[in-house]
Image (spheres, grey):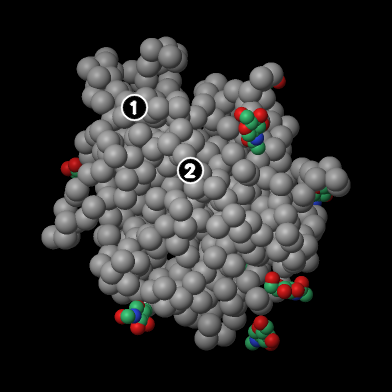
């Protein structure tokens, strides 16, 4: 997914607006009705960006990047819509409001691709393992939360998650001693990068498949993925989760940037492994959950308020993708408390403080939504709107606020505790889905996602004393 450090000039242009301080949305965390009502408002505003259910539009897509995206005018990439549908499944789970369920199901099913594995042909020229993974994560959530099952002639949620796991398992190689590459196909920019989010999506889905199905094969692939990440240093002894590493150096130089969703995706995966295992193995996962939570708090929650540390201070280097990452961190923090209840108290402090701040930050009136309640990213600024707005900011506010209903919410189901989604263990291994990358045509200039964008945003950043050439890419992280 994303890898660009494009200046968001539009952000700067809007900053002048924020001298007018509004009140934000009124949220009372002691009232479930208040939380539900605020979530409803924020979800509504988020969905004003979605047009996929209108005639002539493509279900499952947010307004995408224009054919020749400019730095200030990038649209939403494919993966983020997959993430947004996950937020809306959560919305229904927490609030019981089914307003968006049909639209969510339509979008999630329209994008499965001919192999029923979230590799739709239209996205081939930008397909990251993490992009595919985000759609697979939403299918997994649908299975665990007993979201409306698709009609029987359509692929089922559990099968879709298994298909993502199986197609990705086939892409592991021995370069750097293991691990999954960022991009799915060799001709894509970023194929030489092995990163935490691609491996994190795989790890998270594998752990949850193990728990849902009781099949140890998934626990084994989750464990070996974790072992590789720690061996190569993408997760260090203090449980920092770093961004990625290049195969050109045999993965010896680590890009130490930290993004909140990387911490969150491993936390939920580890918490699920803790729940699935027993004895000394469980004790090992318990230590990992505790360590990951400790470092998540240290890095991403100054004053208990969620903060996207790598870009939020100035916002200038926040790409459109980065604006959504706190949605996934807070989603997975809450979900982790269900399978690892021993972290509940510490997590709730974070979710409560952040939710209050996020509601205050929903005080914006950008030109395209002059309603005085659009959410900025900068929760720590309280009611002083930061001048930004969009799907990512709405989603992040939605997830952190509705997560405060986690205690009353049901635990994620498994196949033996009432889960109704059906899964075929061989999903994703049929000819239709085992795409041979070499058979795919290399992208032409016109088709490659963000091709013109790429060269424009190659940026050199200094990370921990190393000069790091950020991978030029306009795609989702
Ligand atoms: C699309 O979905 C929204 C809910 O997000 C709904 O309000 C709207 O009526 C739908 N539009 C069409 C054309 O179905
Ligand atoms: C792929 O793109 C074509 C042309 O824009 C469109 O008609 C089709 O619905 C798209 N399919 C998916 C799965 O997005
Ligand atoms: C590359 O890294 C892997 C994993 O750390 C290691 O096993 C392998 O020996 C390394 N290869 C070379 C050529 O250094
Ligand atoms: C468990 O998962 C493995 C790997 O996907 C699969 O080959 C096997 O058939 C599964 N076992 C059962 C009982 O479903
Ligand atoms: C731990 O789980 C395994 C199966 O994964 C089971 O065979 C064993 O009996 C369990 N041990 C305890 C102490 O519950
Ligand atoms: C997590 O932090 C707590 C409190 O600071 C500390 O006692 C514990 O040892 C830490 N655990 C790990 C695994 O780092
Ligand atoms: C945290 O709170 C302290 C004391 O109120 C303040 O000085 C600091 O700026 C805050 N940090 C952030 C990131 O909000
Ligand atoms: C595993 O998850 C279930 C469902 O949420 C929970 O009731 C149980 O306490 C968890 N197990 C452990 C060891 O925490
Ligand atoms: C799952 O959903 C089905 C269909 O809505 C319903 O009949 C069933 O009771 C639900 N099961 C659980 C455990 O929630």
Q: Is residue 285 above or below residue 422?
A: below
Q: Position of residue 139 (x, y in %)?
A: 66, 50
In this rendered view, identify the residue nearer to me: 125 or 342: 125
Q: Which residue is drawn at the image coordinates 39% and 54% (left, top)?
A: 190
Position of 150 compared to 393: left or right?
right
Please, which residue is most extreme toward the left here? 465
Decide which of tag 2 and tag 1 comes sooner along the chain: 1
Q: Which residue is mark 2?
A: 443
Q: Residue at x 55, y 57 (%)?
A: 438
Check disc 2 and report its element: helix, strand or loop: loop
Instruction: Tell me the crowding category of disc 1: few under 14, some 14 to 19, or many 20 or more residues within 10 angstroms, Cα based.
Output: some
Which residue is under mark 1? 70
Give x and y (percent) for residue 107.
Answer: 66, 36
Q: Which mark is residue 125?
A: none
Check disc 1 and report its element: helix, strand or loop: loop
With 219 as the anchor, is 416 left or right in this view?
right
Viewed as shown, does residue 88 lie left or right of 149?
left
Q: Position of residue 150 (x, y in %)?
A: 79, 44
Answer left or right for 364 relative to 437.
left
Q: Can residue 87 be seen in this snapshot?
A: no
Residue 59 lies in quadrant:
top right
Q: Please tell me whether residue 363 is drawn above or below residue 380 in the rendered image.
A: above
Closer to viewer: mark 2 or mark 1: 2
Q: Quadrant of ligand 2?
A: top right
Residue under the image location 31 percent in, 55 percent down? 258
């Amino acid at each position: 997914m994303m890898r660009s450090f494009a200046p968001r000039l539009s952000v700067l242009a809007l900053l002048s607006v924020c001298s007018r301080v509004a009140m934000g949305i009124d949220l009372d965390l002691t009232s479930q009705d208040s939380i539900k009502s605020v979530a409803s408002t924020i979800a509504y505003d988020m969905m004003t960006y979605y047009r996929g259910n209108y005639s002539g539009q493509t279900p499952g897509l947010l307004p995408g990047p224009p054919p020749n995206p400019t730095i200030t005018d990038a649209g939403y990439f494919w993966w983020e819509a997959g993430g947004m549908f996950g937020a809306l499944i959560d919305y229904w789970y927490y609030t019981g409001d089914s307003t968006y369920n049909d639209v969510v199901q339509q979008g999630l099913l329209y994008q499965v691709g001919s192999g029923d594995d979230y590799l739709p042909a239209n996205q081939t020229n930008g397909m990251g393992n993490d992009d595919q993974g985000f759609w697979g994560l939403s299918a997994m959530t649908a299975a665990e939360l007993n979201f409306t099952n698709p009609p029987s002639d359509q692929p089922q949620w559990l099968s879709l998650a298994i298909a993502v796991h199986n197609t990705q398992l086939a892409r592991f190689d021995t370069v750097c001693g293991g691990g999954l590459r960022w991009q799915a196909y060799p001709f894509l920019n970023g194929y030489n990068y092995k990163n935490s989010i691609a491996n994190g999506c795989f790890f998270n889905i594998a752990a949850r498949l193990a728990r849902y199905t009781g099949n140890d094969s998934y626990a084994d692939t989750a464990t070996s993925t974790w072992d590789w990440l720690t061996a190569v240093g993408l997760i260090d002894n203090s449980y920092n989760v770093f961004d990625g590493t290049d195969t050109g150096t045999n993965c010896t130089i680590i890009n130490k940037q930290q993004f909140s969703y990387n911490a969150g995706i491993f936390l939920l995966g580890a918490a699920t492994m803790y729940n699935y295992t027993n004895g000394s193995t469980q004790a090992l996962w318990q230590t990992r959950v505790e360590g990951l939570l400790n470092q998540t708090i240290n890095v991403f929650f100054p004053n208990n308020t969620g903060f996207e540390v790598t870009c939020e201070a100035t916002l200038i280097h926040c790409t459109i993708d980065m604006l959504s990452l706190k949605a996934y961190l807070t989603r997975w923090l809450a979900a982790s408390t269900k399978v690892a209840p021993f972290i509940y108290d510490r997590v709730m402090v974070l979710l409560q403080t952040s939710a209050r701040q996020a509601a205050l930050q929903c005080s914006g009136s950008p030109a395209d939504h002059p309603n005085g309640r659009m959410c900025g990213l900068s929760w720590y600024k309280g009611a002083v709107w930061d001048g930004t707005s969009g799907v990512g900011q709405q989603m992040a506010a939605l997830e952190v606020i509705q997560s405060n209903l986690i205690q009353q919410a049901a635990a994620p189901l498994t196949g033996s505790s009432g889960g109704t989604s059906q899964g075929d263990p061989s999903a994703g291994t049929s000819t239709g889905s085992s795409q041979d990358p070499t058979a795919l045509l290399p992208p032409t200039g016109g088709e490659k996602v963000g091709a013109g964008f790429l060269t424009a945003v190659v940026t050199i950043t200094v990370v921990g004393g190393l000069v790091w050439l950020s991978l030029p890419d306009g795609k989702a992280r």
